[in-house]
Image (tube, helix red, strand yellow):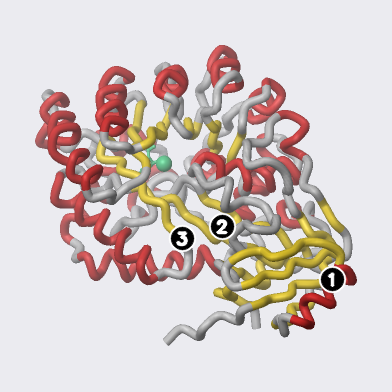
Amino acid sequence: MTPSPPRALFLHSAAQLLTLAGPPVPRRGPALGELGIMRDGAVLTWRDKILRVGRTRELAGEARRLRARLVDCRGRVVMPGFIDSHTHLVFAGNRVEDFERRICGATYEEIARAGGGIARSARLVAEATEHELVAQARRVLDEFAAHGTTTVEVKTGYGLDVANEMKILRVIRKLQRTALLELVPTLLAAHALPAKYRGRPQAYLRLITQQLIPQVGRKKLARFIDCFCDRGAFTVSQCRQVLAAGLRYGLIPRIHAEQLARTGACRLAVELGAASADHLDQSSDADVQTLAQSDVVATLLPAANFHLGLRQYAPARKLIEAGAAVALATDFNPGTSPTLNMQFILSLACSQMRMTPAEAVSAATINAAYSLRCANRLGSLEPGKQADLVVMAVCDHREIPYYLAWNHCAMTVKRGRIIHSQA
Ligand code: NIG
Ligand code: FE
């Protein structure tokens, strides 16, 4: 049994309240570093929404009238919950074998060609029951919540046939009904070419565009459509087919772009009005300009570079200085990024890509919300928005990335309800 939420919460006396207040548009350039910091800040929630934001003493009277439950945030940072806008949450088992082979010298692409990689995860998903997949994902979601994440985008992509992609979508549906976090589903059937389609990619693409996408679109099982546009995966023109088919059924494109090789995926993202182009490690200066002049969010996933042991990271500074809308996400997946900790992503963004702590916070909240098309409801602390927030056990937001690989999250509130609280 889950306890009914208190009707009002009063989180008060925060050392820093990061409001990120502003219009529900992506923050670019200098605006990315503006957190709207309030000292001695307070948030008063009513049911699932934020009622008021201000100084503790300005809100105390109303909090008393509403008999709000008090949460003393002295010496702590209160901020919007993290929005993880790129994950591959639903998979079976793990890929520690790949991990060890890479340590011994094999590359990600060599392992994939030898039948490891995504194909291995697809075999494990095919063998797993829906119940097992739900159970594994739910355990992970509890960890997401305990680390301060309140919304998670979830891709399919380890099904690689109609039955198993649909199975993953049903798993996501089930999790949406029962999990405390909010899940945003994305269809990523064009993740890898299944072995039995070797030499005939068009046959697999027909399966996706003529069978899978119409079903998913009609049943509204996904909001977005994604594809792995890269060397060893799918070409720009193949991805254009998939994403355009998705668009016809109301699925908004996102793209795995310029990760292993530069392919032109950024340009495709802009051409199709994609919500997001993700990874961007190999993007050129021209790609940076193309993205900067568009509404496509440049979503950076530095934990994948870190886990793969790469020296090169996406050009975050160039993107920010050109005026692109930059977001950060975990890319949580068994192959390249087995972390769910957005605080660690902030650390990598700062130390490896030279983003400032404030820029990293905006990228992991309001800009990520924008890329999921929910910035009018999520991503900042403002009256009328959903009461999704976290209390961090630090008194300055810069300490979040500074103390790397810690978990500072003391409390997580989702839709006005405390879903995680440190003892
Ligand atoms: O985002 N690049 C493609 N997809 C994932 C990796 C998936 C896997 O290796 O299982 C990524 O890095
Ligand atoms: Fe990914």
Q: Which residue is mark 2?
A: 341
Q: Residues within 10 Å of mark 2 (few under 14, many from 20)?
A: many
Residue type indicated by callout 3: Glu
Name the front one of labels 2 and 3. Answer: 3
| Residue 322 coordinates in the image, percent (x, y) | 68, 20
Residue 359 x %, y %: 72, 40
237, above or below 153, in the image: above
Q: Quadrant of the N terminus?
A: bottom left
Residue position marked by numbered label 3 in the rendering:
182
- Residue 333 visible to the viewer: no
Q: Residue at x 20, y 52 (%)?
A: 166
Q: Which mark is residue 13?
A: 1
Q: Name the amino acid type tagged 2.
A: Asn
Q: Give the alpha-carbon distance from disc 2 to disc 3, as whole Å.
A: 16 Å
Decide: few, some or many residues near mark 3? Use Cα within 10 Å; few <14, some 14-19, many ≥20: some
Residue 222 visible = yes
